[in-house]
Image (cartoon, rainbow, N blue to C red):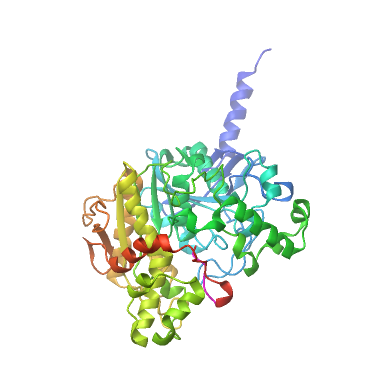
């Protein structure tokens, strides 16, 4: 057959003319981004098929193809949830069709850039990649490609049922949200080069439940080779599994059956016919957590959460000085009822733990309650994470404590937080502009330093670079050192060791600890 080369060349030239300069070909088809100052944004890019209908509670499937050039200029809805994913932010539009990611890439040509993939927090029940605080444009100007990826939440992301386990070719159920994260990382490996990224230098990072996800991805064999560095901010799961039976598959299946019964569903088919809105709200808390299963998280009962080293990569991890201030109200805490109040929420605890938090006066008791909640929910896990990295892995760990108290305005959603849960995010994403607080030069300098550390770590596996205070590796089980990220930016010994060590020595006695009750006005540990 004779080919008319003139016509073929003309057709190819026409294709080049119709493809915009910021267009790229990815799985599913061609996309075109939106160019801004120094950055190209690709928003609402599908990385998997919509998990709806018969695909509800199944592994993510390949994205469906589209024709023409898809304009990636609008964020997709968040996954099904109720409430807001960040205090002070308006609720995001929601949909069960939510498996999308967003990419910010430097606009200037150059060699392949390091990639940073962010998973938002929200206790596995909330979270959105569209809130302005998480936009990666400022990080991208530091020479990295930033990806934010949504994943299924609540019962739609973590429901386990015997019928789902029987249906699965892997005899597992309950970790659909984690499978989404793994699918997003697979998409990054196969597609990010077309958007200027280096698939051999991928850093996963997250905050709260997003950091817990990072710790679990480090333990999952399915994520092996999909990333080369990890950052965890204020989250992780490292308690011995025998103390957390609800995370075991059989217990999670029983909880799932009880939840289905409350919904009036007597079969998996009935559950799949229900509108997605039925699976949001406070009644879903008991079936909205990861599950230890034989496929995604095949951990032995003797393991600590995420202790298994399927992915031995450099780690940067830490937490905030006042984590609990944004999560609990302590105005009514009294010394006389301090121990009884904790027992009512958490179950009976060994006296050695309570003794680590002096509470003789009401003022002491209020601070003790904040410190106790900080260490129980976040502090001990990140400390254990760093220690396990040093003890069981070959890759280095870098440990931090965020101590800066942002100058949030009185009357704002963040008033009185101090260096609380979430507070570091304005600095990590260098988006002080997303809050009307009267930021100072010290705040701007800290944001510059933190983004410098985070992006350098993504590039090399070591946060240190010229012009930044030297950050030493975490080396010893108790002494640290850790990096203080606050008004002072300097290394020093790990603080708050009295309470952390009390949890260490008492963990074998904590068999009766139960998660906090949502009805009591508390937030379950992410």
Residue 56, given in percent of the width and then of the height, sits at 69, 50
Q: Residue at x 45, y 45 (%)?
A: 219
Q: Main secondary structure of the magenta part?
A: loop
Judged left or right of residue 397, residue 264 is right
Which residue is at the front of the view, 524 or 13?
524
Which residue is at the front of the view, 327 or 466?
327
Q: Which residues are magenta?
A: 521-525
Q: Residue at x 65, y 40 (%)?
A: 68
Can residue 199 be seen in this snapshot? yes
Give yes or no for residue 90 being in the magenta stretch: no
Can residue 281 be seen in this snapshot? no
Choose top left, top right, bottom left or bottom right for residue 439.
bottom left
Choose top left, top right, bottom left or bottom right for residue 508.
bottom left
Residue 512, given in percent of the width and then of the height, sits at 50, 65
Q: Is residue 121 placed above or below 100 in the rendered structure?
A: below
Q: Quadrant of the N terminus?
A: top right
Judged left or right of residue 56, residue 45 is left
Q: Is residue 231 placed above or below 11 in the rendered structure?
A: below
Q: Is residue 306 placed above or below 501 in the rendered structure?
A: above
Q: Residue at x 72, y 65 (%)?
A: 262
Total labels drawn? 0
Judged left or right of residue 36, residue 456 is left
Residue 115, given in percent of the width and then of the height, sits at 42, 45
Residue 515, given in percent of the width and then of the height, sits at 52, 67
């Amino acid at each position: 057959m004779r080919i008319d080369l003139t016509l073929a060349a003309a057709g190819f030239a026409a294709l080049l003319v119709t493809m915009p300069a910021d267009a790229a070909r990815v799985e599913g088809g061609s996309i075109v981004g939106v160019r801004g100052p120094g950055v190209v944004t690709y928003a609402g890019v599908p990385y998997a098929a919509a998990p709806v209908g018969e695909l509800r509670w199944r592994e993510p499937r390949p994205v469906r193809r589209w024709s023409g050039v898809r304009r990636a200029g609008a964020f997709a809805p968040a996954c099904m949830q109720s409430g807001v994913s960040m205090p002070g932010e308006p609720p995001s539009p929601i949909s069960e069709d939510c498996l999308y990611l967003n990419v910010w890439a430097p606009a200037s040509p150059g060699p392949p850039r390091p990639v940073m993939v962010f998973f938002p927090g929200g206790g596995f029940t909330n979270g959105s990649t569209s809130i302005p605080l998480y936009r990666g444009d400022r990080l991208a100007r530091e020479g990295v490609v930033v990806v934010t990826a949504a994943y299924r939440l609540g019962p739609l992301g973590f429901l386990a049922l015997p019928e789902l386990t029987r249906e699965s070719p892997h005899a597992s159920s309950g970790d659909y949200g984690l499978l989404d994260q793994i699918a997003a990382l697979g998409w990054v490996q196969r597609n990010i080069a077309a958007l200027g990224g280096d698939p051999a230098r991928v850093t996963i990072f997250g905050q709260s439940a997003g950091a817990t996800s990072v710790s679990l991805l480090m333990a999952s064999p399915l994520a092996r080779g999909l990333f080369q560095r990890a950052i965890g901010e204020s989250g992780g799961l490292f308690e011995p599994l025998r103390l957390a039976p609800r995370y075991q598959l059989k217990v999670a299946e029983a909880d799932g059956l009880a939840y289905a019964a409350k919904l009036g569903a007597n079969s998996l088919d009935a559950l799949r016919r229900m509108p997605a809105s039925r699976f949001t709200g406070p009644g879903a808390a008991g079936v909205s957590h990861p599950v230890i299963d034989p496929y995604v998280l095949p951990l032995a009962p003797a393991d600590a959460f995420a202790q298994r080293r399927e992915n031995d990569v450099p780690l940067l991890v830490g937490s905030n000085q006042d984590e609990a201030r944004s999560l609990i109200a302590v105005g009514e805490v009294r010394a006389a009822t301090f121990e009884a109040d904790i027992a009512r929420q958490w179950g009976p605890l060994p006296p050695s733990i309570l003794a680590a938090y002096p509470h003789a006066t009401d003022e002491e008791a209020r601070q003790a309650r904040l410190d106790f909640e900080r260490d129980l929910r976040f502090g001990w896990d990140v400390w254990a994470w760093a220690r396990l990295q040093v003890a069981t892995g070959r890759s280095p760990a870098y440990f931090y404590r965020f101590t800066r108290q942002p100058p949030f305005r009185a009357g704002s959603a963040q008033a009185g937080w101090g260096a609380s849960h979430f507070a570091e995010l304005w600095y990590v994403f260098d988006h002080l502009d997303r809050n009307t607080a009267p930021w100072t030069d010290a705040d701007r300098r800290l944001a510059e330093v933190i983004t410098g550390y985070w992006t350098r770590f993504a590039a090399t596996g070591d946060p240190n670079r010229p012009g930044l205070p030297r950050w030493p590796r975490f080396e010893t089980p108790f002494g640290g050192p850790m990096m203080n990220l606050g008004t002072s930016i300097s290394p020093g010994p790990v603080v708050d060791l009295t309470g952390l060590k009390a949890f260490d020595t008492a963990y074998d006695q904590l068999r009766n600890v139960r998660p906090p009750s949502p009805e009591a006005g508390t937030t379950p540990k992410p």
